[in-house]
Amino acid sequence: MTGKPIISIKGLEKLYILGEVEVRALRGVSVDIEEGSYVAIMGPSGSGKSTMLNVLGCLDRPTAGQYFLGDENVATMGDDELSDIRGRRLGFIFQSYNLIHQLTVVENIYVPLFYQGKDLKDYERHCERLANLVGLGERLDHRPKQLSGGQQQRVAIARSLVNDPLMILADEPTGNLDSKTGTEVLNLMDKLNEAGKTIVLVTHGPEVAERAHRVLHMKDGVIDREVINRKFEPRKQANSDWLSAIEESLGLKTP
C-alpha cells in the first residue's frame, strides 16, 4: 500500500441469528482500501460480499472487529451516528436504482441533501450540473417512469455524488442494463475515479471487475484471494473541484 487508507478493517465479523441457526457471514475480514482507488468485490452467492458492502456502507453494524472510515471508527457507532455518516460521507448506487417515482430527476438527485435539512433552492443549480454530467440535462423535469433503465441509473449516479461523498458504493450497478448502456455507465464511473472518487463495487461480471485497480474475491465470509489489475497511483494533490474536472474531461461547459 502506498496511499492513505480511506477504509481500514481489522478482524471484521458479522453473525446473523436466524431462529436457531447461526450464520457467520463475515469471518475475520481484514483489508485496507486506499483513498482514490477503485476496488471490486466478487464472489458466489453466500460468500459475504453483500454483507461486506452493507457494513462498508454503514447499513449494517459488524458483530466484532474494527472499521475505520477515514478517521472515524464506525464499528462502534449507534444508529443515529451511522445515519449521519451515510448522509455526509457516502454515496450509493443500487442495481434497482431506488428512485422515488413521484419526484423529478433534479428532485431525486437532491434527496440525500433533503435528509441533511438542506433547501433545494440553495442546491438546485448543483443538482442540475450533476444531471448534465450524467447526460440528462434535457430531462430535468422528467420522472423515473419517463426514463429508460440506463437513464434511471444515471440519475442514481448523480444522486450518489450530490453530497461530495468520501466514497461511492455500487451494488451491481449494471445488473439491470443491456451491455451497451452498462458500458456507458461504467465509462462514467471510470471518469469519477479518474477525478479522485474512491469506488467500491460489488459485481458478478469479470468484465466489470477488470476496470478496478483491485479485485477482492470472497468465499465463505473471508477474502479468499486478491487480484491486482493495475497499480494504483495515489493523486499527488486532492482535486478540490472534482465536478469541474469531470465536466472539463467530458467537454461540458463549467459555469
Image (cartoon, rainbow, N blue to C red):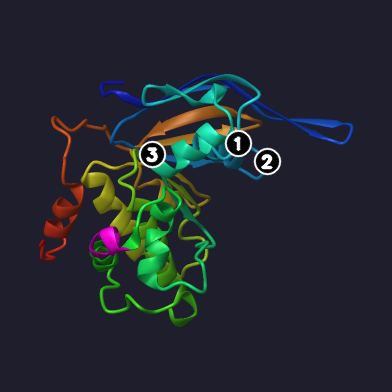
Determine whether 103 is above or below 36 in the image. below
Magenta stretch: give its range: 121-127
Q: Secondary structure at mark 3?
A: helix
Q: How far separated are the C-alphas under marks 2 and 1?
A: 17 Å
Q: Which one is in front, 245 or 222?
A: 245
Image quarter hosting the C terminus? bottom left
Q: CA distance from mark 1 to mark 3?
A: 16 Å
In the rendered image, which quarter contains the N terminus?
top left
Under circle 1, the secondary element is loop
- Residue at point 61% right, 33% down? 219
Whether residue 56 can be seen here? yes
Instruction: Tally the numbered discs.
Output: 3
Q: Position of residue 151 (x, y in %)?
A: 39, 72
Q: Which mark is residue 255?
A: none
Please identify the quarter of the rendering in which residue 231 is found. top left
Please give the name of the residue rendered at 32% of the width and 78% of the height, measured from the top-left corner.
Answer: 139
Q: Residues within 10 Å of mark 3 (few under 14, many from 20)?
A: some
Residue 119 belongs to the span the image colors magenta:
no
100 left or right of 120?
A: right
Q: CA distance from mark 2 to mark 3?
A: 28 Å
Mark closer to the chain start, 2 or 3: 2
Nearer to us of marks 2 and 3 is 3
Q: Position of residue 29 (x, y in %)?
A: 56, 23
Could you tell which of marks 2 and 1 lies nearer the N-terminus? 2
What residue does disc 3 label? 89
- State the mark number for residue 46: 2
Amino acid, disc 2: Gly
